[in-house]
Image (spheres, helix red, strand yellow):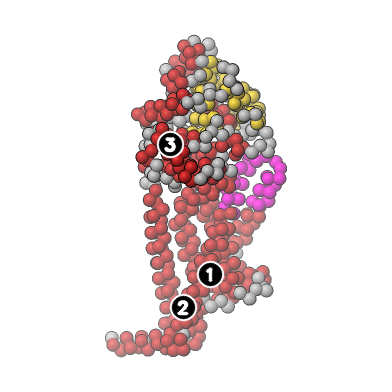
Amino acid sequence: MAEAFSKFKESFTFNFIEGSRWKYITNGLLVTLKVTFFAVLIGLMIGVVVAMIRSSFDQTKDEMQPGLGKTLMTALNAIAQVYLTVIRGTPVVVQLLIGYFVIFVSSTNTVLVAIMVFGINSGAYITEIIRGGIMSIDRGQFEAGRSIGFNYVQTMRHIIIPQAIKNVLPSLANEFIALMKETAVCGYIGLMDLTKGGDVIRGRTFSAFMPLLAVALIYLILVIFFSWLISKLERRLRSNER
Amino acid sequence: MSAEIIISVKDLQKTFNNGEVQALNGVSVDIRKSEVLVVIGPSGSGKSTFLRCLNLLERPTGGSVVFEGTDITAPRVNINLCRRRMGMVFQHFNLFPHMTVLRNLTLGPIELLNKSPAEANEKAMQLLERVGLSDRSDAYPFQLSGGQKQRIAIVRALCMEPDVMLFDEPTSALDPEMVGEVLDVMKELANTGMTMVVVTHEMGFAREVADRVLFMDEGVIVEQGTPGEIFDHPKSERLRSFLSKVL
């Protein structure tokens, strides 16, 4: 027992303490959190806007009078459809590589590229989540807002979106957690995230067990922590409902 | 009955499903200032559609609605500005469940009428006092009874200081013992001189409060007149058979 412990300690020291190799883990963790956080933020913004375009087009296409407005909405809706199809129809690793080597090729800020790519990627999934939330709101809420004199966007902003977001909060939380794990592939473009950090230690020490398990454990703890945080938030938001 | 006309409806048509269903088939009526107009009729007669066309929640497929001199069915009319002056009360209340009562009442005035929160709150509290619910201003809608919700919904519309109030079967979703409290609020409102258009199945209310009653069936106005004419001396066979079922 004591022997096993001292071996563990030796391995731990070798992998993390010597040469301050723990910094690969902590710095990587920061990068992972940074990419995930800002990507979700971008995804949320894209998601709300695209979901509004999609659902407003579906709701009003039959009643809209021909004219500039209708042409514009039809075009926006078509763009949204293409965006959703392409993003959801291709692997995120491929999008990451295209983003880094084709689209943002002149950018030297790898973190920013990863944030943009994952943000645009999760935007597509968040769009569908929020669209579902919007459609789940009773039509009477929309009519009540409009009858007071709010225009379409104001009604969405004050009345529909807050309720929709609340309804889809569990799904959004899952998206956040899934995205955090998905960012593990950003080593493909040379970004030193948590996974890459663990892998670099493995390459230095030639011992796979300790660094990779440490990485897995950190992801697990993060997921458990955020799940707990979100369930707390959800309970608070539910306080104005039965 | 010489007061100025506030809403003038001409030959209103509304079809659904690309013309398959004719909900309104040529409805014309002038609504005067301070008038209480009650619309009755069997289910599917088009009375709710008529009401919803007045503030363009349904877009008419023909005819015109002139509100305070503006033809709101014309293209490029800012309907949102017109709707601020037309309050609407729904069958299912449609209070905003994620806001307190007070926030429900002040959202419109603050966001649309540029009132300060203090000003909007004061007005809302005054009106809540009038309907006897000033102690519920911090409650959420789910904490209220149906009758309370509908009274709040009426106040929400009044907070916008509308020129006309539209009621779409305001008591149909209520438990019977709560109908009275809502009708009392509406009666009081009528006494203050508010112009009201009320679609309802409450014949007692129509008889007592209405200045004029419209009887609609199959998308047209079959008969109209004072409550006395409609309820005591119905002329058409359809109105007689309708009244014999509901009275």
Chain letter of mark 2 equals: A
Does A170 sit above or below residue A105? Answer: above
Per the image, the residue denoted by label 3 is: B126
Report if residue B95 is visible in the image.
no
Tell me if mark 2 has few (under 14), some (14-19) or many (20+) residues whose alpha carbon lies within 10 angstroms of its own.
some
Image coordinates of residue A170 in percent, x first then y, are 44, 57
Q: In the image, what residue occupies the spot 43% across and 36% down?
A: B126
Image coordinates of residue A233 in percent, x first then y, are 41, 58
Report if residue A153 is visible in the image.
yes
Q: Quadrant of the N terminus of chain A?
A: bottom left
Chain letter of mark 1 equals: A
Q: Amino acid at mark 3?
A: Gln
Per the image, the residue denoted by label 1 is: A35
Q: Quick one: label 1 or label 2, which is nearer the N terminus? A: 2
Residue located farthest toward the left when viewing the structure as drawn: A1
In this picture, which residue range is highlighted in magenta?
A: A50-77
Q: Amino acid at mark 1?
A: Val
Whether labels 3 and 2 share one chain: no
Which element type, helix, strand or loop, lies under badge 3? helix
